[in-house]
Amino acid sequence: MVTAVYPGSFDPMTRGHLDIVTRASHLFDQLVVAVVRNPNKAPLLTLQQRVQLIQTCIQQSERPITNVTVQPFEGLTIDFAAAAGAEVIVRGLRAVSDFEFEFKMSQMNKTLNPCVETLFMMASLEHQFLSSSVVKEVARYGGDISKAVPPAVETLLKEHYQGGLCTLPVASVP
Ligand code: ADP
């Protein structure tokens, strides 16, 4: 049985992330979406909100996804992967922008633990220029993000930025 970990901030999950989750879920027996708590970043959504939102997006996905779990973590991804019994770390690659950072990170992870392989999956053509930060910027000014994020994310961001019923606390950095 091969387990893979797909780590990231997912602040919030986009259709690009969900596409990687869906495709990776077909390649591995178990996929763990690992949501990082990074004390150096101030995310829009709390760790708990990001985890719950990903779970909802997976449940509501057009294609059923059954072998994926979502877990929060803090610390080194490579340590989380080893503790989860994963042999593979999955990362998404968009156009040229991600390559340099991802290449360095994968080399470092290989040095830290040679038993865990990093596997890159190319972003689908329609998601090449999609990022969580662009989504937040568009949503902030009331733009249409329906093609960029799953419906649950769209609802949450709209409510947040339009001052609706749901108010998201900006996660505090300890
Ligand atoms: P980070 O891990 O740097 O905090 P994200 O949470 O945004 O970044 O992304 C997690 C992973 O998903 C990374 O491997 C990133 O390259 C990948 N990714 C981000 N956006 C997309 C996209 N539109 N299509 C495919 N993969 C993506």
Image (cartoon, grey):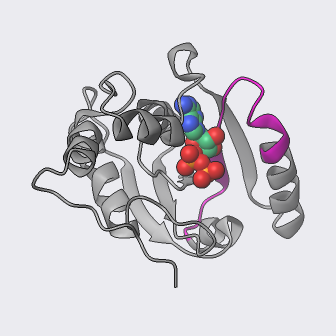
- The residue located at (29%, 42%) in the rendering is 153
Q: Viewer-proximal residue, 146 or 104?
A: 146
Please, is residue 74 above or below residue 96 in the view? below
- The residue located at (47%, 54%) in the rendering is 33
Please, is residue 118 above or below residue 24 in the view? below
Q: Which residues are magenta?
A: 84-101
| Horizontal arrangement in the rendering, residue 98 relative to residue 62 (left or right) | right
Q: Viewer-proximal residue, 87 or 152?
A: 152
| Horizontal arrangement in the rendering, residue 150 relative to residue 78 (left or right) | left
- The residue located at (31%, 38%) in the rendering is 65
Q: Is residue 163 magenta?
A: no
**Residue 47's spot in the image, x, y percent?**
40, 67
Q: Viewer-proximal residue, 109 or 84?
A: 109
| Horizontal arrangement in the rendering, residue 103 relative to residue 146 (left or right) | right
Q: Viewer-proximal residue, 68 or 164?
A: 164
**Residue 51's spot in the image, x, y percent?**
35, 60
Figure quadrant of residue 94: top right
**Residue 135's spot in the image, x, y percent?**
44, 36
